[in-house]
Image (cartoon, coloured by chain):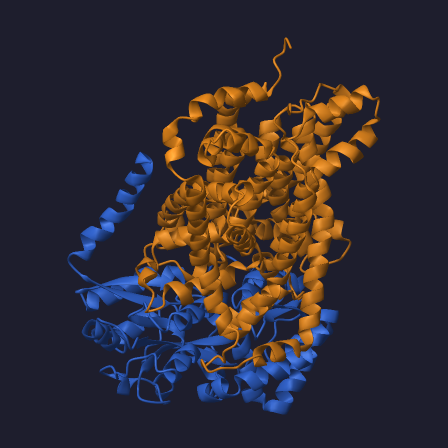
Chain colours: A blue, B orange
Amino acid sequence: MKALALLILALATPVAAEAAERTKLTIYTALENDQLGPFKAGIERAVPEVEVVWVRDSTGVITARFLAEKDNPRADMVLGLAASSLLMFEKQGLLAVYEPKGVAALKPAFRDSFGPYSWTGTDASIGVVCFNVAEAEKDGVKTPVRWADLLVPALKGKIVMPHPTSSGTGYLLVAGWLQGMGEEAGWAFMDKLHDNIAAYLHSGSAPCVQAARGERTAGLSLDMRGAAEKTKGAPLAVVVPSDGTGWDEEAYAIVATTKQLELARKVADWGATKSANELYARSYAVVAYPGVATMPANYPANAEAAMIKNDLGWMADNRERVLAEWSRRYEAKAAKK
Amino acid sequence: MARTIVAAALPEAVPARSRALPENLVGTVLVAGLCLLLVLIIALPLGTLLIKSLETPAGGLAGLDNFRTYFSTPTLVDALLNSLTVATTTVAIVVPLAFGYAYALTRTAMRFKGVLLALALLPLFAPSLLSGIALTYILGNQGFLRGMLFGRTVYGPIGITIAECLYSFPHALIILVTALGLSDGRLYEAAAAMGTGRLRTFVTVTLPGARYGLVSAAFVVFTLVVTDFGIPKVIGGQYSVLATDAYRQVVGQQNFPMGAVVGLLMLVPAVLAFAVDRLIQRRQSSLLSARSVPYEAKPNPVRDRLSLAYAGLVTGVVVATYGVAVWASFIRYWPYNLSLTLDHYDFAAADADGWGPYWNSLVMALSVAGIGTVVVFCGAYLIEKLKLFPTGRAFAQLLAMLPLAVPGLVLGLGYVFFFNAPWNPLNVLYGTLALLAINTLAHYYTVAHVTATTALKQIDPEFESVSASLKVPFWQTFRRVSLPICMPTVLELAVYLFVNAMTTVSAVIFLYGPDTKLAAIAIVHMDEAGTTATAAAMASVIMATALAARLLLALVHRFVIARAQAWRRREVSA
């Protein structure tokens, strides 16, 4: 019991000491673990009276949690969460209306154009192929350049992608094909791709991690995950297919019910500045502020050029229809494979 | 001997002051209190969520539309059949294996029992993700034993079944050890005296005695497998099961009503379990009567060596699997750079919180074990041994059986809706370690409750009858008879709750606050971020902690309990 009391004391002390000086701002985020430290430091340097407190989880979990808590929200802000999630929050009136200073300078695609201004984009997450060159060499498969290159028979059963009903990344890819190739050609492509798919996984990052480990030859995922695996030493080529790929953007917003509105606005203002965007650019290739381009290590060079003209509104409005059609085509069949 | 103990205990328990408290009133109040607690931590959160199953995602009334939509999904039948197939296969493999293991532990004079029990519980000590990581390394497409699958893939029913077997084995083992542990040696003496053969003794004495335990174990395993989503998510590949359906409704599409619908479907096995439990209970006679003598295996070299070989083999497979995961935590980059490193144990490099989540987990697990054991055991006693307020006791029993069937994800969501509601005065608890502890207790209530009940069932109700006729209130009987007899089970419960609290993920993932992230959640995050080795490292630390708790229990058992329980044995001279 004494040990227990000591432990509680040890846990409580540092928190209590800091809280006396600064105001805590709880931010829900889906940023990667290693981004949390630099982002916290960046925000606290710009707004010294704030102490950033993260609640971090994967996009799906944090989105579900935020919606589940909507009758009594616990977050003051959301940051580094997919814009498609923020669009959902916006439609349910959960976000505060506020246009941070300086958003006019950002690229138009990163500004909220859907309703009363409530969220601001920070960077783009782009659909890529994590391609294990070491494994591909064993089968004599060339590194793909276009989506159609994934349809070769030698890749049969060696490709994994996120399940679009479980993972936002999966839906982003599907929506990318449908918008980029047109509906008919998009479904025709997926019909053929389906024959080469080993499994649709219930996670956006798992396909790339499996490809990095050589469990699979190709994993469809997001650019940042691919670059991170490659940096750690995986024999990966991170391919952005040249015929256009789907993407989503990370964004931030103030929660409507926050009691720290003034501080949150200051943080929101910081989020649109050039220096904040230079921070984003340390981990993402494409950021909201024009002209900020410091390419992070191991990023595919052609990323920005290959981004399709993505309509977030279309993605939101057609989600149910597309997922139902996807399930009809591939799920019943998938189970029998 | 046992009779003299009871007799000795009673006279001093009779004084008038104990009669001053009306026993019936105290009993009724306690049962009502138990019901209230269970309603608060189990029924209301689930109820709040189930109301959601009748709503549209936007909050309007949908009636039964969600159910209609779900049943018209073409994949439902597949998911349902897949769930049933995997669960049935797992039960068929695990229950006999665990029974054999429990038999070796309780009915033979095999050596190294303490160590073998502790090692067999290893899967319980590790977050379920770890078995997924280990299986990938062993049988995955780059695994060093992948040849054993003859070209079939581990990602699918094979992988799920193997991982579920590992995961559910200790749960079945705990129940069966309890069932076989309390037995009447006189039955075996009688059988031996009548010249009954070994097989016949086994079929007519051992099996019927363990019937309740066997059925409980089968249902616990079945339900665990149906509701677990962690394993199918990591290693299930394309094979869809009910639990992944719930996962993608809730996390993939934030469709809480549909998630609740799937959650509701998964309650069916629990309700069945409850019905069967009631049915069997009517037939089960207590094994440990007031005149009982514990069974003590006489050394039998052949049987004991065979048992040791069998237990060694099973433990070997378990330990080797988890050993691979521990080994993985020291490898720089699997499978392309196999050099060894300690880097992955520097948690701060992968997660800003560093070791913080570990200490959170420790505090949470200690409080769950401390408070939970008292609640569960006293609760089981009230339900099992009191004769008053039958409606209340049946209601509490139903609630106690419920959590097992509820996927952690669904329970966690229920907790968000109930404990975060603006009208709920308890919402101050939200995000605190206290709520995490309450949630974990609720989540693991059933197996703990079944274990306590199994132990209590085997104590002759005669103890209560005698006490009642001597006007000894039940709390005296509890303190002086039931509790001491069940002391080994009570400690077992504490370790079970501690260990599960260290490893649980699915329910608490919605509930932790900024300062209360748990180690097992940190592991999920590390794995998602691709730092598999760090995830394995943190999981190894958790496993070591849980193993230490378990070994501590073995020591306590050996030096304290064994002595305290010595009265149950016959004196050697007699």
In the picture provided, is B360 more to the left or to the right than B195? left
Q: Residue B33: x and y, percent?
A: 42, 50
In the picture provided, is A95 more to the left or to the right than B556? left
Which is nearer the eye, B171 or A160?
Answer: B171
User: Residue drawn at (42%, 81%), measured in percent from left and top?
Assistant: A88
User: Residue drawn at (63%, 11%), measured in percent from left and top?
Assistant: B572
Can residue B94 be seen here? The reply is yes
Q: Residue B50: x and y, percent?
A: 51, 69
Q: Quadrant of residue A6?
A: top left
Q: Is residue B381 above or below residue B52?
A: above
Q: Quadrant of residue A66?
A: bottom left
Find the residue positioned furthest to the left. A21
Can residue A133 be seen here? The reply is no
Q: From the image, which quarter does the N terminus of chain A lie in?
A: top left
Q: Quadrant of residue B106?
A: top right
Which is nearer the eye, B179 or A201?
Answer: B179
Which is nearer the eye, B230 or A203?
Answer: B230
Q: Residue A314: x and y, percent?
A: 49, 89
User: Residue drawn at (79%, 35%), measured in percent from left and top?
Assistant: B203
Which is nearer the eye, A292 or A125?
Answer: A125
